[in-house]
Image (cartoon, grey):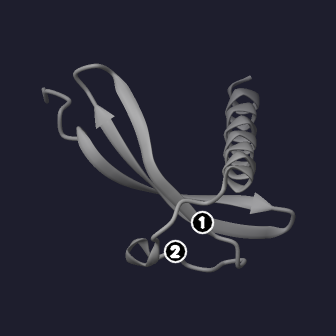
Amino acid sequence: MGTGHRCAGDNYIGFRFLSGTDMLYGFALLNLDTTNGVATIQKWAYNDTPDGAVHVEDITAVPEPGTAALALLGLGAGGLRAWRSRRKAER
């Protein structure tokens, strides 16, 4: 059995979300502190061109707070939708 420290430190994750009828893609750089149980988003970005790729090396700035809130709302809505689908399938 592993110690669970393989994910500690900086980790990139990709995400996608639906904005209207457009699929948008992005990434987040997370720092995981497994000792204290804390996850911190270091930076994140997404491409606002539908179906457009995001290249981590091209990102130099973090989006403004309004964009961040909208993206998090989209991620939350996608998670809620997936949770409801699984819950409905279990019945």
Q: Residue 68 placed where, x, y %?
A: 66, 51
In what quadrant of the picture does the N terminus appear?
A: top left
In what quadrant of the picture does the C terminus appear?
A: top right
Left or right of 80, for residue 7: left
Question: Which amino acid is tagged 2?
Answer: Val
- Near-viewer residue (73 or 60): 60
SS category of the residue bearing label 1: strand
Q: Which residue is mark 1?
A: 46
Q: Residue at x 55, y 78 (%)?
A: 53
Q: Residues within 10 Å of mark 2 (few under 14, many from 20)?
A: some
Tell me which numbered mark, 1 or 2, is placed earlier along the sequence. 1
Q: Quadrant of residue 85?
A: top right
Q: Residue at x 71, y 56 (%)?
A: 67
Q: Quadrant of residue 49?
A: bottom right
Task: Mark 1 and mark 2 in contact? Answer it, CB < 8 Å.
Answer: yes
- For the image, the number of numbered tags is 2
Q: CA distance from mark 1 to mark 2?
A: 6 Å
Q: Residue at x 51, y 66 (%)?
A: 61
Q: Residue 17 placed where, x, y %?
A: 69, 58
Q: Residue at x 23, y 38 (%)?
A: 8
Q: Residues within 10 Å of mark 1 (few under 14, many from 20)?
A: many
Up-down: is 47 above or below 34? below
Q: Which residue is mark 2?
A: 54
Up-down: is 49 above or below 84? below
Left or right of 6, for residue 36: right
Question: Which amino acid is tagged 1?
Answer: Tyr
Q: Residue 23 placed where, x, y %?
A: 72, 68
